[in-house]
Image: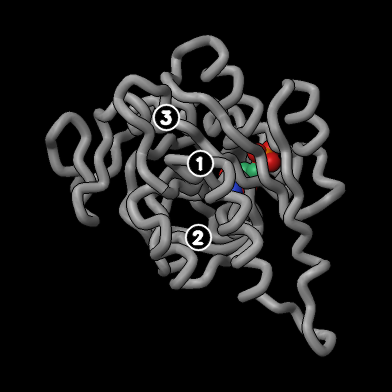
Amino acid sequence: MPVSSSTEAPRLAVLISGAGSNMVAIARACEAGSIPARICVVISDVAQAGGVARARELGLATEVVDRGLFRRDGVADRAAFEAALAAALDASGADYIILAGFLRVLSAAFVQRYTGRMLNIHPSLLPRHKGLDTHARAIAAGDAEHGVSVHFVTAELDGGPLIAQSVVPVLDGDTVASLSARVHAREHVLYPTVIQWLANGRLRWNDGEPTLDGKALTLPVKLA
Ligand code: GRF
C-alpha cells in the first residue's frame, strides 16, 4: 500500500470493536479540516459494535470482519481472521491504520506488514498498566495519576514507541466509571492531535525512532 501522493489527503482506516467514541472524534476532526486526512473505512471485528452504526450515521464506509466467524475445528483461527482484515485494509487503500478501541491482539506478522503506519491509543500512562482493566488497576494500585497514551504499534503488546500522553488525577472516591470518563475526555483530544501530526508529516516513524518536527521523541509529548 503506497502512501498517498502528496497532492492527496492521506487515507485513514480506523479499527474498532466497541462504542467508537474515538473514531467519532477523529472523524469530526477530519471533517473540520483540523486533521488533513480522510477516513477511507471504519472496520469492526464485532458486528454489533455501536461504533459501526455511528460510523454509518457519519456517512463513513464501514466493514465488519467478524472475528467470531473465523474458526477452525472449534478454535479461533487468527491467521484466517488477519488475512481477511489485511485484505479489507489493502482494498481500502489506507495509508495509516488507526486502532481506536480495537480489542484484538494482532500477530507480529500482521503488525510488521504495517510497520510505522499503525497507531494505537491505550488508556494508561504506558509503560504502566499494559493490557486490560487499566482504570481498575490504577485505582487498586493507589496511583495518584492516570491517563492515556498514543503509540506506534509494534509486535510487543502496548509496547511500541510512545508519541504522546495526557495525564489526569485519580481523585478520592473515584470509580472505574468516573475515572474512565475523565480519561476518555482526554482521549478525544489527544488522538486527533497525534493523527494531525502524522497526516501533516510532522510525526515520522524514522525506522523505529520516531521524530516530531525532526526531534527524537525520547519522551512522549505531554498534552493537557
Ligand atoms: C478507549 O478507552 C481506548 O483508549 C481503548 O479502548 C477504548 C475505546 O473507546 N483502547 P471508544 O470505543 O473509542 O469509545
Q: In the displayed structure, does residue 174 sit left or right of residue 9? A: right
Residue matched to label 2: 129
Asked which quadrant contains residue 8, the reply is: top left
Give, as a three-letter code, the residue at label 2.
His
Q: Earlier in the sequence, mark 2 or mark 1?
A: 1
Residue matched to label 3: 10
* Viewer-proximal residue among 105 and 57: 57
Q: Earlier in the sequence, mark 3 or mark 1?
A: 3
Give, as a three-letter code, the residue at label 3.
Pro
Q: Earlier in the sequence, mark 3 or mark 2?
A: 3
Residue matched to label 1: 93
Residue at the (45%, 72%) spot, across then down:
109
Q: In the displayed structure, does residue 124 sit left or right of residue 83? A: left
Task: Give the foreground label among 3 and 1.
Answer: 1
* Disc 2 residue lies near ligand 1 with CB under 8 A: no
Residue furthest left as drawn: 215
- Above or below, 139 against 14 in this view is below
- Which dot marks residue 182? none
Residue furthest bottom as drawn: 73
Residue at the (82%, 39%) spot, across then down:
50
Question: In which quadrant of this rendering is ligand 1 seen?
Answer: top right
Measured in 3D between alpha carbons, the distance from the residue under mark 3 to the one under mark 1, in whole angstroms, is 10 Å
Residue at the (25%, 40%) spot, across then down:
204
Q: Secondary structure at mark 2?
A: loop
Measured in 3D between alpha carbons, the distance from the residue under mark 2 to the one under mark 1, in whole angstroms, is 34 Å
Q: Secondary structure at mark 1?
A: loop
Q: Secondary structure at mark 3?
A: loop
Measured in 3D between alpha carbons, the distance from the residue under mark 3 to the one under mark 2, in whole angstroms, is 32 Å
